[in-house]
Image: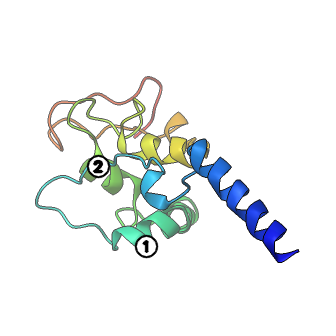
C-alpha cells in the first residue's frame, strides 16, 4: 500500500513537472508599473497603495462630492499628475499605463476615467491632453 502511494505521488509530480506546472511566484507574470514622477513621494508605501487605493479614493470622493473638500492628500488628480506615463502622458490610455496595467492583471474594470481625465493638465508632466470627453 505504501509503495503504491509513493509511486502514485511520484507519477503525479513527474506529470506536473513535464507539462511545466511550476506555480512558483517567480513564474507568474506581473504588471510592469511605471515609476512615479522623479522627485515625488507617494502618500503611502506601495504595499498599502496596492491594497487600499480604492478605499482612499472612495473616501476622498465622498468628502469632495458631499463636503466640497478639494485638494486633499488622496486625490485622483494627484495620482494622475505623478503617475502619467512618459510615452502616453496618461494613466489610462494604453495597456502599459499605470492604472491600466494593474487593473488588467487583476481583471478589475476601471471606470474612473469615463468621467475623470487620465492625463495631467499641460505643464504638470509635460504636454498632454485629457481623454476625449473626460472631465478634470
The secondary element bearing badge 2 is classed as helix
Position of residue 12 in the picture relative to residue 27 (left or right): right
Of callouts 1 and 2, which one flags the residue occurring earlier in the amino acid sequence? 1
Residue 95 vertical placement versus 110 (above, below): above
Residue beneath the point at 54% across and 53% down: 22
Name the quadrant of the C terminus: top left
Residue 38 vertical placement versus 101 (above, below): below
**What is the CA distance from the residue labelled 1 to the residue labelled 2?**
16 Å
Position of residue 8 in the picture relative to residue 106 (left or right): right
Q: How crowded is the residue under tag 1: few (<14 C-alpha within 10 Å), some, or many (20+)?
A: few
Pick the residue in front: 92 or 31: 31
- Name the residue that disc number 1 marks: 48
Position of residue 41 in the picture relative to residue 62 (left or right): left
Q: Position of residue 131 (x, y in %)?
A: 40, 28
Residue beneath the point at 36% across and 45% down: 98
Pick the residue in front: 29 or 41: 29
Q: Position of residue 125 (x, y in %)?
A: 17, 42
Tell me whether circle 1 and circle 2 mark residues in contact (CB < 8 Å): no
Q: Position of residue 7 (x, y in %)?
A: 75, 63
Q: Tell me the mark number nearer the camera, choosing from 1 and 2.
A: 1
Q: Position of residue 118 (x, y in %)?
A: 39, 38
Residue 135 vertical placement versus 38 (above, below): above
- Name the residue that disc number 2 marks: 83
Amino acid at each position: 500500500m505504501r509503495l503504491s502511494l509513493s509511486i502514485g505521488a511520484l507519477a503525479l509530480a513527474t506529470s506536473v513537472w513535464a507539462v511545466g506546472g511550476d506555480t512558483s511566484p517567480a513564474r507568474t507574470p506581473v504588471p510592469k508599473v511605471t515609476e512615479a514622477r522623479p522627485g515625488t513621494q507617494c502618500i503611502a508605501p506601495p504595499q498599502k497603495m496596492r491594497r487600499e487605493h480604492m478605499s482612499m479614493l472612495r473616501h476622498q470622493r465622498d468628502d469632495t462630492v458631499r463636503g466640497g473638500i478639494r485638494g486633499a492628500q488622496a486625490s485622483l488628480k494627484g495620482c494622475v499628475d505623478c503617475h502619467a506615463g512618459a510615452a502616453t502622458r496618461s494613466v489610462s490610455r494604453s495597456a502599459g499605463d499605470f492604472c491600466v496595467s494593474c487593473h488588467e492583471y487583476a481583471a478589475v474594470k476601471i471606470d474612473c476615467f469615463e468621467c475623470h481625465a487620465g492625463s495631467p493638465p499641460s505643464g504638470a508632466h509635460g504636454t498632454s491632453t485629457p481623454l476625449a470627453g473626460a472631465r478634470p
